[in-house]
Image (spheres, grey):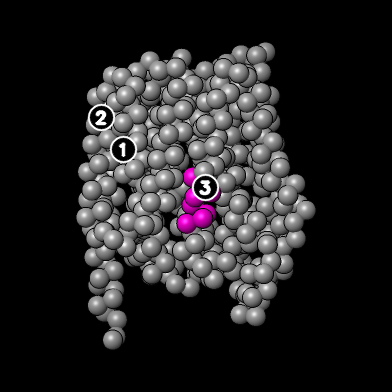
Amino acid sequence: METADIHPRAPEDAGLLASPGPRKALAGFFVSGMLLAFLGAILPSWGHHLLSDYWMVGVYFVALLAGLTSASRIAPCLLRNKGIGATLAISCASASASLLILAFFSLAFFPPALAAWWRLPGIALLGCAAGVLHTAIFHAISPVYRHDPAATVNLGGALFGFGCFTVALLISRMFYMYTAAAIQIWLALIPGFFAIAYARARFAPCAVTLIQPPHELWAELRSPDAVLFSLVLFFQFGNEWAIAGWLPLFLSQRLGLSPSTSILILALYWLALLVGRIAAQWILPLVRHARLLAGCVLTAVFACVILIATDNQFGAVTGVLLLGGAFAPIYPLVVERIGKRFPDYHPGLYNGIFSFAIAGGLLAPCALGYFAWLFGVRAVMGLPLAGSVIVFVLLVLAWLEARLHWSSQPQ
């Protein structure tokens, strides 16, 4: 994957830290969270809680993943030719346009079967906008990351999680108040506002953007530690987004909950993830990581079993809160390891690892469309159940590899 690289000098970093540009770019993670969590929350508004066309839902996520993948070619060209500020503005404007396109095909005069297929270009544009936004953000925040890595990662993750929570909460509260088209028009205003803000913002020319040779980036991502970290995030994001993409449909069809209630429980899931990751920053220094990891995996497995077996709303809420809390500490654990193994920030490396993880997150709901079509909606909880065990094994391998790495270093 080609990506742009930034090589600032030390005197330039001081000027960039004084500039509000990197901090404004960091706020783009909120829009990113909204865009990627939108599809899982909007499905009941499109009527899929009443249908069993699970394969079509999987096709939606395939279109989102295709759009996200195409951004790897588009983003470097925009960064070179337009700069960071314009790239951020263009990505947010494209996201707003994609939501308006989807709103148009949600109007009543479009037959449901026809509207489902015509939504695919809008979903692909949504994914492309999110991918371009990610690339621009990772390049824009490099100065503040060098200054305070932990705060930058924690704030970015919190904003991303808050965006996911916000879109689910808004859709759940507007479900019976507005039509699907009106909901999407209201949501389109948020990235539209960010597009205007980024177009007016001034980003200091922090560095010359260069294209990193693909073989160099591949060599970095091919190292054993980077591969393990990428695989952990790949499967962990897959676990998280399998729930995020299918939870409302699972609760509506499995338990008979109303669509509004199902989407609200999805918002609780995002809230549990957000609060859990913030709390993990306080817990990590106090608890042995191996014990914490084992506890998280066992809790995640137990929560999946609850969701598979429950037949009431209380059990669903309990399982979702446990699952969100169990998933939450895993991402901070991995980010901490990445920071220790890669102390020199490299936008290409981090964007590559993050994009690979997001791809895993979207492949999971794609695959669930096929599994749910074959085995029924209960299969939705089987994937995160198996994925949690895989994450545990990969993290153990990553820690073993890290011990071998440090033991081989000279004193």
Q: Given contact means CB atoms under 8 Å apart, are the residues at marks 2 and 1 in contact?
A: yes
Q: Which residue is mark 2?
A: 306
The residue at the point 44 percent across, 17 percent down is 258
How busy is the neighbourhood of tag 1: few (under 14 within 10 Å), some, or many (20 plus)?
A: many
How far is the residue under mark 2 from the one under mark 1? 10 Å
Q: Residue at x 38, y 51 (%)?
A: 279
Left or right: 62 as drawn, with respect to 137: left
Give residue 162's position: percent from left, percent from top: 52, 43
Q: Nearer the viewer, residue 257 or 375?
A: 257
Q: Nearer the viewer, mark 1 or mark 3?
A: 1
What kind of element bears circle 2? helix
**Along the line of sight, which residue is nearer the eye, 6 or 188?**
188
Question: Of helix, strand and loop, which one carries label 1?
Answer: helix
- For the record, the magenta segment spans 154-161
Q: Position of residue 288 (x, y in %)?
A: 24, 60
- What residue occupies the far right of the structure in this picture? 200
Left or right: 81, with 152 as reference point: right
The quarter of the displayed image where residue 268 is located = top left
